[in-house]
Image: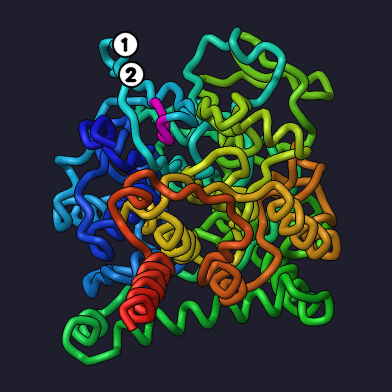
Amino acid sequence: MSQMKLCPRVVIIGAGVGGLSFAIALKRRFEYQDFTIFEKTDAVGGTWHEHTYPGCSSDIPIPFYSLSTDQDPDWTASHPFQPEIQNYWARLSKKYSLTPHIKFGTVVVKAVWDSHASCYHITYEDVKTGKQSTTSAEILVSALGILEIPKIPNISGLSDFEGAVFHSARWVDMNLDGKRVAVIGNGASATQFLPIIANTPNIHITQFCRTPNWVFPPVRMYYSDFHRFACRYVPFYMRSVRFLYYLVSDLAYLAIFSNSVTRRPVQKFVEEYISNSSPEEYRKYLIPKYDLGCRRVIFDTDYLSTLHRSNVHLNYGGIGSIVKDGIITQEGEHLPFDVIILATGYCVDKYPLHIEGRSGQTIQEYYNSKGGPTAYMGTTVPGFPNLYILGGPNTITGHTSVIFTEEVQINYSLELIKPILNGKLSVVDAKHEATDRYNEVLQKRLSRSVFVGCSSWYRFNDGGKVNQMFPGSAAQFWWWLRRPNWADFDVTISNEDKTGRIGFTGKIWIWLGLAIVFAFLSVVRS
């Protein structure tokens, strides 16, 4: 234990919303200071620091897409843009004095569990110099999130293109005036940035799409001065607004995800919105053939109206290959382009970090053995003691705030971590059989869900088991993770607790033993 005192007791990987939230919870709940956050970039915020494409914003109302412990009365809109959200997390980092705990420009290379020392040996690297160093920690928190690695499509000739190519997640701020731009993909990011870049003078955009998405009407509302005043000064007003947004999100689960009866009228409403808002020539391509909720739903941010512009065209014919000056469609047509923007999502099936557990098996190897990402309560992985994954397998809901679900995960994790920080336990590890039972329940419920009705990133390799989504409401997610079931964990009592502390049961035996001794001495004396 003396060696452990020389290194961080807790290491958090990532200073995005999950990592910062975990660190804040450590300070608020335990007044705990002995932790280090490794962050590969030069600032906090994670997704909201790295995603700078035009129009980037939350699709969940911000009072519910922010920490329950740190509500902000000054939001400008229900769905603010990236700079405002990034600023919120930067202010929280300053408020809780997290910066001294963060190693910026540092990427974790690997972490290996040491059963003898009951800790992880962590190798990290300076992203500028390449210099590697090591440290150790009893507790490891993975806060990488699911939007960590941009997905680059496997299109023949992509590397041969001589113009500019970049992923929307790594946006390049360049002058698009007069450029011929190809946008590959039509997910949430594309529908946010395309209406904005379409206003660039003399730009010509062709968007290559494969599968249409269900597009809901716009939901962004700009808040008035009165609303902000009420949030700041009227008791319970701000909390009531947050609760209302939570309530609406769980009602959306009941209406869309829980059953087909209530889903049909909602789907019909959205279909009519798409038909009434889009150009007639694209209408047949824009209405999905799969059920509403099977893939991520999108809220319109002037995307459908932008399709009416003469400088914007959709192409559903497919890409055959990419050549040095453009794209060859599957029909053999050559389309010249100056810029290609990839809006092709993220790699969510692969765990992006080398972590070895008890047996030397890595997280990815465990995932592969289970047919895709698998965890207990989406938070712990058997064979990987004292490791906690935020945004782990089957923790996404599709309808509610990821900040809420991660707060639930954090509170759950802190209950497991508390005995380690108190010196009572040294190891907490989910049991394999408990993990298998939990996932059998999950997959049984998911097999009857709307998520299996189409291919999507919700499923392993787009068509395997559903490994991203949680089959229930936000309230149910909270209920399942409200407290740990310690019978589902293997634990090891710490040496410090064995030698330096006496538990309640031990004290009973000591008093009982003393009582017997005194009783025996009394009998002998008499």
Q: Which residues are magenta?
A: 117-121
- Queried whether the magenta region covers residue 237, the answer comes back as no
The Cα–Cα distance between marks 1 and 2, rounded to whole angstroms, is 6 Å
Residue for badge 1: 130
> Which residue has dot 2 on it?
125
**Residue shown at 31%/78% (left/top)?**
525
- The residue lying at 49 percent from left, 77 percent from top is 246
Q: Amino acid at mark 2?
A: Glu
Labels 1 and 2: the sequence-earlier one: 2
Answer whether residue 118 is magenta in the image. Answer: yes
Q: Nearer the viewer, residue 120 or 363?
A: 120
Q: Position of residue 51 (x, y in %)?
A: 40, 41
Kindly tell me whether residue 360 is visible in this rendering. yes
Q: Assign a secondary structure to mark 1.
A: loop
**Quick one: 21 or 388, which is closer to the camera?**
388
Determine the residue positioned at 59% across, 11% down: 159
Asked if residue 256 is positioned above or below residue 153 in the image, the reply reads below
- Tell me the residue at 65%/74% (across/down): 253
